[in-house]
Amino acid sequence: MAVLTELVQHFVVLMLENRSYDLMLGGLRDPKYVGVASGRELPCEGPLGPTVAISHGLPPDRMGPDPKHGLLDVRRQIYGALPAEPKADMLGFARNYYERQLNRSEFHGDRAACMRDFMTIYAEDRLPVLHTLAKQYAVCTHWFSSLPSLTSPNRAFAHAGTSRGEFEQSTFEWFGLLRDITVFDLLPCNPGAWRVYHSGPPHLWLMGDEWLRDKKDNFRPFERFARDVRAGSLPTYTFIEPRHFDLLGSGTSQHPPHSVSAGERLIASVYDALLSNFALFEKTLFLIVYDEHGGFFDHVIPPGHLGWDDGLHAPHVVVPPDEKRAPGFGFDQLGVRVPAVLVTPWLDAGTTVGWAAAERALRQTFDHTSILATVDQLAPSAHVLRHSRRAQAATALNLPARPRVRRPEECPGPLLRGVALHDASGVALRMLEPVPLGTAVAHAETTPDSGPEKELLDAWEQRSGNRSWAELETHTDTLLAPSP
């Protein structure tokens, strides 16, 4: 039987923000998706009662306040009450959300309503784009963030297989520690080897002005993606950044409080573009993945944590990267499970890849360094597997391939014309309409206190003395402008 390595020539990765597997995919009803049952209770001491329960439904399109998800918060979420000899139980999410966000003196919203929103996961087909692709192609049921912490170190592992000992957002200085070791540095610097599509300032600007200017030929606005696909000009590796800033509801990253529906439209637009050139789609693997869980509930104990053997596990050793270890964290534990969907016509509809898979070849554990392992299979001369963690990572290309789709009409979609979204009240929205700002819940924050949006603005303030997103956008546009 053929494997994907023999058929795929292009790898497209769309990395979105801050949503857990159970939140986005845990409501799929088939047990093979390793979701979570409605009614599962979590401890929540305080006026909301001793416990709160997971429900399947439709969370607010704009969730707020944003759950905390730094290293210490994630540890509390994974280890619950933190006894003297802690054992992971995944019971601390509700308590942590209440204590860190809802029980603050500056919070004036409805605590009970916020907790109900937090404990609601998307029921089947409530995310029509992501759920359609998940059921019609393949889901990695055990893809974990690379460490139990924030956006930046996890994106660093996706780009370089290491965060150089850093595990918090505030300790990063524009990704400078990663220069010369990212996949973008190790692949040939030409648009045929790799390309980054972005909407607004890319998060990779944190690598510095000089780095971005040197590689500007490899960066293109996302509006070019569909045209390049139709022209058959995709490179070996494509990385897509969403729009990180939510001006007038334009953010597409799904980072709270950004609109989930807007991110759904972004996913659909990438898929529809690929489907427009079926000859290219047949040679492409499209991965939809999230950088980390964002503090949202997931019930699967990640590898490396005491107690992670829950009877469904596959043997997996979390290899630390080669560099220094930060005090207090050994980089030998994965972070919380995140959604990961593989789209290619060479995978059977309903395929699941993970610990519960029926076929032994599909029982794999992934983290973000699997992105690098997959690139390395497509471009082995680049030697992107330079670090220990990514050298042992599972690749998405060793899966058995089956030609179940032979014609474009056998594929679902195009999704932008074929699926409706719903706002927080369940009212259908046509896909091409902007998500009304009125769908934001009353208690949603206007600006997240973590993630790429804040990080980009902090870096711009450090460089220019102001926090004007418009000026940052002008600055990066200038850096990426074609040479005269």
Image (cartoon, rainbow, N blue to C red):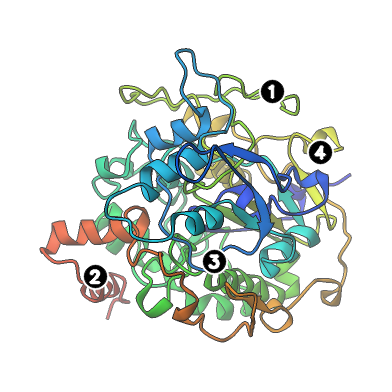
Q: Position of residue 199 (x, y in %)?
A: 42, 72
Quarter occupied by residue 355? top right
Which tag, 4 or 3, sits closer to the chain's start? 3
Q: Name the residue that disc number 3 marks.
A: 60
232 up-or-down from 105: above or below = below
The amino acid beneath tag 1 is Pro
Give the CA separation, mark 3 to mark 2: 30 Å
- Decide: few, some or many residues near mark 2? Use Cα within 10 Å; few <14, some 14-19, many ≥20: many
Secondary structure of the residue carrying tag 4 is loop
The one of 454 and 268 positioned closer to us in this rendering? 454
Q: Name the residue that disc number 1 marks.
A: 315
Which tag, 1 or 2, sits closer to the chain's start? 1
Q: Name the residue that disc number 2 marks.
A: 472
Q: Are marks 3 and 2 in contact (CB under 8 Å)?
A: no
Q: What numbered label is drawn on residue 357?
A: 4
The one of 131 and 359 positioned closer to us in this rendering? 131
The amino acid beneath tag 3 is Pro
The amino acid beneath tag 2 is Leu
170 up-or-down from 347: above or below = above
Secondary structure of the residue carrying tag 3 is loop
Give the CA separation, mark 4 to mark 1: 14 Å
Q: Position of residue 406 (x, y in %)?
A: 88, 68
Whether residue 160 can be seen here: no
